[in-house]
Image (tube, rainbow, N blue to C red):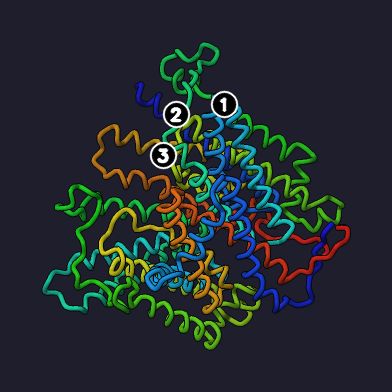
Amino acid sequence: MLRLEPRPAPSRAWTWASPLLALAVTVLIGVVMFAVLGKDPVRGLQVFFWEPIKSAYALGELGVKATPLLLIALGLAVCFRSNVWNIGAEGQFVIGAIAAGGVALLADKDTGRWIVVAILLAGVLGGMAWAGVTAFLRDRFNAGEILVSLMLVYVAIQVLGYLVYGPWKDPAGYNFPQTRTFDAVTQTPKLMVGSRVNVGALLALAGSALLWVFLFRTRAGFAQQVGGLAPAAARYAGFSSRRALWTALLISGGTAGLAGALEVAGPLGQLTPYVPAGYGFAAIIVAFVGRLHPFGMVLAAILMSMFYIGGELAQSRLGLPKSLTGVFQGLLLFALLACDTLVNYRVRVGSTK
Amino acid sequence: MDAYALLLAATLNAGTVLALAALGLLINEKAGIVNLGAEGIMLCAAIAGFATVVHTGNDWLGFAAGMAAGALLAAIFGWLVIWLNTNQYATGLALSLFGVGFSAFVGIGYVQAKLPERPQYHWLGLGDIPLIGPALFRHHPLVYGAMLLAAGLIWFLYRTRAGLVLRSVGESPESAHALGYPVRRIRLLAVVAGGALCGLAGAYLSIIYTPLWVEGMVAGKGWIALALTTFATWRPARVLLGAYLFGGVTMLQFHLQGQGVQVPSQFLTMLPYLATIVVLALISRNPTWIRVNMPASLGKPFHPGS
């Protein structure tokens, strides 16, 4: 019988090794799953782990998907570190996209490039407002943020549906539920020719550095985290838990909204019912796999982005549903949580009491 | 007249999905475990049940398959959170994300599948009574099963020794452990039972309620079921009432649409989610309701000897 024995201190080696082991376990389960369902496992692995990195174009696409994942995860890390369980980033992303789309619709051919800034700002504010609802209900009514933020995802998706089927529908769009394509001037600047990676990728990386400074080099960042680790100590030190709640939710709503705006003013270029692509949920896994560390999350976002592209390729190449992405993402989080046991516990052979 | 009977009937039907899942989650939570994986469990069970009925033509085998799928997924979740002490929220989320993807993956071949002819029910010859006949006496047996389940759960939790032990494990696992109860095994059992009921709810949804398979068809009902346990302040009878109330809200949108109410359908679809938020806020604002009734160790890990 295997037995878990608490370590006197968390193992540093396993802190690093555990995500790698988790990835290995995920791949292994994936292989078994492909085999059981009668698909060629080697082909499946190729699609998920080799094709997304084999060419410059593929790498660019990796960056396109990693950008929103990283941005949202950065905000979520602030939440989770302060023990605020915002799992409605998907909704904040959607509202950010809607707000940004609303501004983008105002642009015409005489509009200046400044409109891009206005679009991104609108996205941030939209996301903050949506997260603010959760913060308000938690603060004022003590309503659990998990369920409230999640229910707001469904509400946000319906708001989007209302707009693209209703008032914002493109009259020249053959009755498709979509807005008109936004003016070229609303497009965020691209980083290189022949790739869809845009300035958002740089913003996400800068955000990562900024988060590192905030968390580990400022008093406010420290105060933000103490409540999550030791609520009693935070109270004793006079750190306000209300402020921590609002800060966490507004930051994460803002980053999710920004991610939504960058999608609108970048790869999407219009609003459709397919704006919610699950980035808000996948970013939760990015945050955990990246250990809530600004730089760890960069790597995790790239990995998750591979799963996204793998899922799309699995659809076109293997005739499998795109939702395979979610299978691998969920498996990875499962595996990581299980492997993290090794950080705090030693596995011993012996009887359990 | 008939429209209201239909509305009431549909309310009971819709409420049954929520009631089965929420009563299952109540068992979990009474033992101190929050399972945010309910949505994923329900989806996997929905496709497991649906596929089974497509192949065997037997609804009851379908329900059994759904329950088995739910119990299996819950067992994995339980093993992770109870034995490996993983974070309950994160593990549940992983289960939901996995379940959403996995059910779509497995279900790809069943999107167009048709189920065999549905039997009609007519209980005790009462189905012909005007108004209340169609509203109350023409339902699938599981609709009454959910009511019986709530009654059984009240008896079990508050009138039996096993129920007392289950509650003590959720209130104070340390004391239960000190008294010699196998806390982790009891918790796992509760989680598996809860998962099986969520599975039954998912199977009921795809076999009886809809009846078809569509990707993501649970559409947040797992999360609403989670919210229901809080609304009900962890009381089985209130869970049942809450489930019918929400079933009613869900049905109201179709009713209003049928009446030609000039509101965009999206706003009607929002109703159950908005109602969840509003009721959650109203219930939670009274801290004594929540604090007195909530199992004291809800969501907290327990590791014997640490």
Circle 3 or circle 1, nearest the eye: 1
Image quarter for residue A93?
A: bottom left
> In the picture provided, is A314 more to the left or to the right than B88?
left
In the rendered image, the residue lying farthest to the bottom is A217
Give the position of the N terminus of chain A as an image quadrant: bottom right
- Which residue in the protein does label 2 denote? B114
Image quarter for residue B20?
A: top right
| Residue drawn at (63%, 44%) of the image | B195
The earlier-in-sequence mark between 1 and 2 is: 1
The earlier-in-sequence mark between 3 and 2 is: 2
Q: Chain of mark 2?
A: B
The image shows residue A226 at horizontal and vertical percentages of 60, 78
- Which residue in the protein does label 1 denote? B56
Q: Chain of mark 3?
A: B
- Identified by mark 3, the residue type is Thr
Label 2 CA crowd tier, 10 Å (few <14, some 14–19, many 20+):
few
Q: Are marks 3 and 2 on the same chain?
A: yes
The earlier-in-sequence mark between 3 and 1 is: 1
- Identified by mark 2, the residue type is Lys
| Residue drawn at (79%, 58%) of the image | B174
Whether the residues at callouts 1 and 2 have beta carbons within 8 Å, the answer is: no
Q: Nearer the viewer, residue B266 or B98?
A: B98
Look at the picture and state if B273 lies above or below A141: above
In the rendered image, the residue lying farthest to the top is B125
Q: Chain of mark 1?
A: B
- Which residue in the protein does label 3 denote? B250
**Residue B143's disc number:** none
Badge 1 marks a residue whose secondary structure is helix
Q: Nearer the viewer, residue A245 or A185?
A: A185
Separation (CA) of disc 3 from disc 2: 25 Å
Q: Are marks 3 and 1 on the same chain?
A: yes
